[in-house]
């Protein structure tokens, strides 16, 4: 029987554990961008899927290479036949059926096919390397999604803070104007204008709260989570200035972009496959052998048997099958070359656009900072003029609106530059 003191201690422990779980649920985990990258690389199912495909492709060279190795098999045969019976229809081979029981082993070894199998092995190996390179492409894609979602969430949180401060400031103005109106120092029209401004800021706050939840949902998916998670995101330092020379960036991207490396490996694989197809017209020489023991047999069979031979297969006419396969393989190589050229053109365009957008976003940082300073100064002047009775509530409301818009623009400019710089790194093949 449990003692009352022990039961009391157990209840206290359960309550403390439950309280800690509640605290953990109410306090989101801190998350830096580096930690977000590591979580996505280890947790995202898209990366795991590509890795499994690459592992599957790595088995294909072994499949082709097996044709170059000896093939050995064992067999057991039991046959019963009527005396002096023959197979009279259905084949051109020896029709005699002899009753016997025998065990044997058979072996075949390809001597040469003049390089067809070796080219198929090289083609499969290059294809496997291309599939492995797709892992790097997928990682870059996932990291770009993480960066975009991360900075979008930071932007949404910043705009939420702006909205909260705007509601607080306009509520204070409304309270002041209401008090002055009660003292007959301001009109009820001023109170109405102040209430409209407060309502607009509350609508802004509602939208900002929704945007924060939406961006966290996007970030959770980018990290590989099914359910939406909430985090306390760490601010990232602003990246350096954009590079000055865009032409060198294009050359770098064409050299480094992982999808272009994949396409070049696929092109090389197609080239090796085309060489293998051109070997179809060459002879194939194979050595075969067989040996066994027959313990039970009719009198005209021996107890042992051995045989060896050399088989030479020379294609003469295949209904233009081989020539069509060779032409198909050659055309696919040419198509691969043209497709690489097309993707290189797209990469050059994407790099230039990313560079232009990053430069524009960088210039917006100083412009929006100056805009915010001027909006703050204008609001202070408008409030002073309104308090002195030198201007109407309309001027004050416009100054408040200008300050809110300037704060939003400055906040967006900061995270837009970080997002655009990340996109530029992706276009250059440096996001990994």
Image (cartoon, helix red, strand yellow):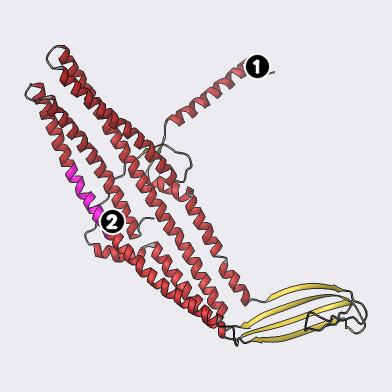
On-image quarter of the C terminus = bottom left
Question: Residue, x 33% and y 63% (percent of image)?
Answer: 346
x then y, percent, for residue 191: 18, 20
The residue closer to the viewer here, 391 or 431, is 391
Q: Where residue 354 is drawn, which disc sits there? A: 2
| x, y percent for residue 174 | 20, 21
Magenta highlight range: 352-368
Work out whether residue 156 can be spotted: yes
Most distant residue in the top direction: 183
Q: Which numbered mark, 1 or 2, is in the foreground of this view?
A: 2
Q: Is residue 357 inside the magenta stretch?
A: yes
The stretch drawn in magenta includes residue 371: no
229 shown above or below 239? above
Q: Residue visible at 67% across and 18% down?
A: 2
- Along the line of sight, which residue is nearer the eye, 193 or 299? 193
Task: Pinpoint residue 143: horizontal percent, then vertical percent.
Answer: 39, 51
362 in relation to 29, above or below: below
Q: Is 380 left, or right, of 24 in this rendering?
A: left
Query: In this figure, which residue is indicated by the disc labeled 1?
Result: 3
User: In the rendered image, which quarter is residue 313 located in?
Assistant: bottom right
Of the image marks 1 and 2, the number of the one nearer the N terminus:
1
**Is disc 1 in contact with disc 2, using a CB cutoff of under 8 Å?**
no
Q: Is residue 382 left or right of residue 122?
A: left
Q: Is residue 117 above or below residue 405?
A: below
Quadrant into which the N terminus falls? top right
- Name of the residue lying farthest toward the front: 89
- Give how far apart the Cα atoms at labels 1 and 2 are: 72 Å
SS at circle 2: helix
Residue 307 position by quadrant: bottom right
**305 on left or right of 393:** right
């Amino acid at each position: 029987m449990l003692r009352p003191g022990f039961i009391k201690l157990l209840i206290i422990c359960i309550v403390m554990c439950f309280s800690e779980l509640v605290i953990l649920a109410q306090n989101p985990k801190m998350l830096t961008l580096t930690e977000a990258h590591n979580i996505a690389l280890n947790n995202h199912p898209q990366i795991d899927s590509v890795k499994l495909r690459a592992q599957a492709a790595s088995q294909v060279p072994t499949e082709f290479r097996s044709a170059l190795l000896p093939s050995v098999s064992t067999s057991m045969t039991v046959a019963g036949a009527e005396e002096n019976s023959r197979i009279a229809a259905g084949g051109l081979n020896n029709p005699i059926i002899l009753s016997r029981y025998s065990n044997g082993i058979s072996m075949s070894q390809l001597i040469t096919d003049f390089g067809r199998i070796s080219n198929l092995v090289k083609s499969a190996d290059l294809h496997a390397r291309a599939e492995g390179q797709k892992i790097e492409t997928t990682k870059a894609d996932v990291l770009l999604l993480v960066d975009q979602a991360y900075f979008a969430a930071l932007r949404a949180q910043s705009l939420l803070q702006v909205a909260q401060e705007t509601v607080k400031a306009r509520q204070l103005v409304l309270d002041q104007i209401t008090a002055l109106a009660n003292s007959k120092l301001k009109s009820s029209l001023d109170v109405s204008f102040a209430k409209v401004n407060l309502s607009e800021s509350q609508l802004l706050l509602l939208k900002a709260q929704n945007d924060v939840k939406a961006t966290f949902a996007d970030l959770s998916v980018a990290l590989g989570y099914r359910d939406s998670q909430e985090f306390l995101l760490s601010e990232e330092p602003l990246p350096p200035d954009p590079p000055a020379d865009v032409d060198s960036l294009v050359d770098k991207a064409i050299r480094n972009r992982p999808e272009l490396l994949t396409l070049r490996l696929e092109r090389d694989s197609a080239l090796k496959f085309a060489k293998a197809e051109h070997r179809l017209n060459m002879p194939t020489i194979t050595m075969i052998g067989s040996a066994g023991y027959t313990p039970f047999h009719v009198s005209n069979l021996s107890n042992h048997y051995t045989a060896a031979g050399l088989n030479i297969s020379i294609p003469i006419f295949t209904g233009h099958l081989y020539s069509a396969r060779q032409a198909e393989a050659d055309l696919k190589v040419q198509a691969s070359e043209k497709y690489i050229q097309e993707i290189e053109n797209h990469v050059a365009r994407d790099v230039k656009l990313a560079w232009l957008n990053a430069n524009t976003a960088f210039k917006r940082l100083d412009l929006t900072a100056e805009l915010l300073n001027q909006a703050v100064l204008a609001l202070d002047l408008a409030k002073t003029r309104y308090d002195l009775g030198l201007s109407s509530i309309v001027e004050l409301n416009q100054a408040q609106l200008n300050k809110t818009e300037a704060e939003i623009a400055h906040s967006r400019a900061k995270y837009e530059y970080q997002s655009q710089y990340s996109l530029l790194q992706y276009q250059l093949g440096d996001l990994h």
